[in-house]
Amino acid sequence: MRDSEHPIRKIIHVDMDAFYASVEQRDHPEYRNKPVIVGGSPQGRGVVAAASYEVRKYGVHSAMPAARAAKLCPHAIFVKPRFEVYKEVSEQIREIFFEYTDLVEPLSLDEAYLDVTENHKNIPSGTLIAHRIKKQIKEKTDLTASAGVSFNKFLAKIASDLDKPDGLSVITPDKAEEFIEELSIAKFFGVGKATQRKMDSLGIKTGADLKAWDEVDLVKQFGKSGHHYFRIVRGIDNRHVKPNRTRKSIGKERTFSEDISDLEWIRDFLTGLSEKISQSMKKLNASGKTITLKVRYENFETVTRSYTLHHYTNKAEELSEVALRLLNETEAGIREVRLLGISVSSLNLRKGGVIGEQLEIPFEKF
């Protein structure tokens, strides 16, 4: 089932559940447990960008014309997309991924591959890491994710879709052969509708049917893709998880179960948060110059305040000092707060963390 030249990897595919629609239901309590469609207007030529699980049972799905979706579910709630909000939430989720590995390959705002074969926390179990990531996403964003764990990207992707929403499925090497043979061709990631119809006409309806074909005949029927089908049906997928961006920040934030107005409590919280961020940075041999404080008030209004130092740092005392000064530029304490966060950007991620650091002469304080 595996290429013997490659060691067993631990790959996780994380896929947020009805991401855009779930964000809207989270931020608008009146939408919860109701059929929500994020996308264009059904009166025009709009398209469904996301559909909540409540509306999917009517046959509504993403990429469907909004007018058709409205006919299938006349009582659906249509909401305009807020991509800036979705992007912000996506960044929060990716920061969780980076706590475990720098081998993160985002596929879109709401899904990514992670290679946790070796990870920052030295956790031997990919399943345990997936469980922790799901838990942290829920705590940090109040959203659910589904995850698949396996020894390659193909199987991890399929596994994440097996138990949605809020699922966690694992396909181990010893179970992979039987799983793939029983799998419907329609479930094979990378097999589109046109290819599925052609395979169906050739009597290929399951993995076992596909496995019965030799590579030469598959190439004759499907061109170069035939090589791909021959390998994946045997559980062979040596594609690497390829990070396609440099990590831009390290941070933590917390949404509180009750709104907070006690300024002294807020200060103590930010001091403790600075210590946790400092520990994370030191584990990654990272340091940064720009410290950003994030405050979300009780009405969901969010403000950020930033300050850039003249030098790199990962020291808790410095992070805390800047964060508390930035706090004075907000209305925290006057207005109730539901979320607080600190992030550090302008990172130096070279081996050894703080390198080439220039001494700062304290002529001024901000």
Image: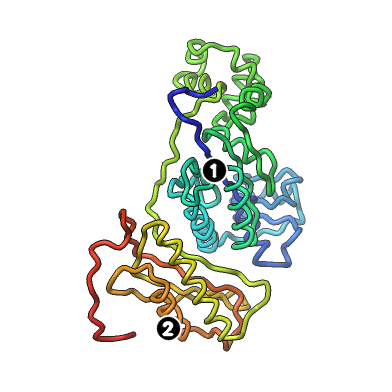
Task: Label 2: state its secondary structure.
Answer: helix
What amino acid does circle 2 point to? Arg
Q: Is residue 82 above or below residue 182?
A: below
Indicate the colouring scheme. Answer: rainbow
What amino acid does circle 1 point to? Pro
- Is 272 placed left or right of 355 in the picture? right
Q: Is residue 188 above or below residue 75?
A: above
Q: Is residue 20 above or below residue 268?
A: above
Q: Quadrant of the C terminus?
A: bottom left
27 or 60, nearer to the observer: 27
Task: Label 1: state its secondary structure.
Answer: loop
Q: Quadrant of residue 160?
A: top right
Residue 52 rendering spot, x and y as whole percentages: 69, 52
Question: Which residue corresponds to mark 1?
Answer: 124
For marks 2 and 1 on the same chain, the one whose residue lies earlier in the sequence: 1
Whether pointer 2 and pointer 1 mark residues with C-beta atoms closer than 8 Å, the reply is no
Residue 279's disc number: none
Q: Quadrant of residue 186?
A: top right
Residue 221 rendering spot, x and y as whole percentages: 51, 15
Residue 289 rendering spot, x and y as whole percentages: 33, 69
- Is 246 placed left or right of 362 in the picture? right
Q: Is residue 43 visible?
A: no
